[in-house]
Image (cartoon, helix red, strand yellow):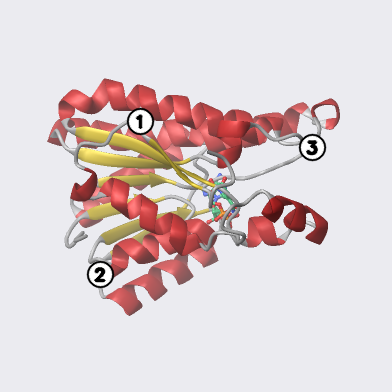
Amino acid sequence: MDFKGKNVIVTGATRGIGRAIAEAFAKQGANLAVCGTHEDAVKQTVAQLAQTYGVKVIGRAVNIAQADDCEALVAETVKELGSVDVLVNNAGITKDNLLVLMSEDDWNAVINVNLTGTFNMSKAALKVMFKKRAGNIVNISSVVGEMGNAGQVNYVASKAGIIGMTKTLAKEFGSRHIRVNAVAPGFVRTAMTDALAPEVKEKALENVALKRFAEAEDIAKAVLFLASEDASYITGHILSVNGGLYM
Ligand SMILES: NC(=O)c1ccc[n+]([C@@H]2O[C@H](COP(=O)([O-])OP(=O)(O)OC[C@H]3O[C@@H](n4cnc5c(N)ncnc54)[C@H](O)[C@@H]3O)[C@@H](O)[C@H]2O)c1
């Protein structure tokens, strides 16, 4: 897989899965535009990626829930890197609770970042891709968006919404040679899952056929595949990377 000279935006790339995705693209020669919520973390990520991989890297602290922030990130990418070839909508948050205990604020916060954020970034990037008649989007959904999960109604609704958005955008933009796919990870070893109680982790592994959590790199490999020419006839697909947790 060669991404030499391709310009790739990865949202939420300062840590966890997004960071691994950004590193995997950089390793294959891609230039990168990264974002996250914290200015310092973004600066550090930009410096480290540029130094380690010798590619062009720009970054911006943004809130993807704000359309203006997303337009600004895409505009800066076009100005500094030349264009946008690939967008990876990875940034996401959780605010878990049972429905009866979930506040409207927590419902809105998760929907605004995960679902509206994916819409905002896709809209901004697709304007550029549409003109070029080329481009590629990979969204990060979740296994719980496919199977449901008690205590995560906001998160699951956002991740299931991303699946619907992926299929719809694949249909809207296919004739422009723009492919849109999603990866649906199972449990991945990151800060998000490190925060889970030990008994919750143990219980989760019981149902994972491969009997281990994914590493962020396992997810990155699937993202690169979908963004690459190896997946040239794949669009509107949801690629499950869950170790056999849900089939
Ligand atoms: N960790 C898992 O087990 C798991 C499983 C399935 C899906 N996912 C999904 O993978 C993605 C990454 O998860 P992670 O565990 O690496 O998360 P993480 O919390 O480690 O990192 C999240 C990243 O997103 C950024 N971010 C958060 N809110 C943002 C906003 N409003 N605007 C811009 N950037 C924002 C953060 O700055 C950070 O860089 C998420 O979409 C998550 O839902 C994770």
Q: Residue at x 76, y 52 (%)?
A: 203
Crowding near pointer 3: few (<14 within 10 Å), some, many (20+)? some
Give, as a three-letter code, the residue at label 3: Asn
**SS for tag 2?**
loop
Residue position for label 2:
55
In this view, the mark in front (2 or 3): 3
Q: Residue at x 79, y 37 (%)?
A: 97
Query: Which quadrant of the structure image shows residue 34?
Result: bottom left
For the residues labelled 3 and 1, the Cα–Cα distance comes to 30 Å
- Residue 216 visible within the image: yes
Residue at the far bottom in the pictured view: 51
For the residues labelled 2 and 1, the Cα–Cα distance comes to 26 Å
Q: Which mark is residue 123?
A: 1
Expressed as whole percent of the image width and height from the top left, the position of residue 145 reads: 57, 34
Q: Earlier in the sequence, mark 3 or mark 1?
A: 3
Crowding near pointer 2: few (<14 within 10 Å), some, many (20+)? some
Q: Which mark is residue 79?
A: none
Give, as a three-letter code, the residue at label 2: Val
215 horizontally vs 24: left or right? right
Residue position for label 3:
97
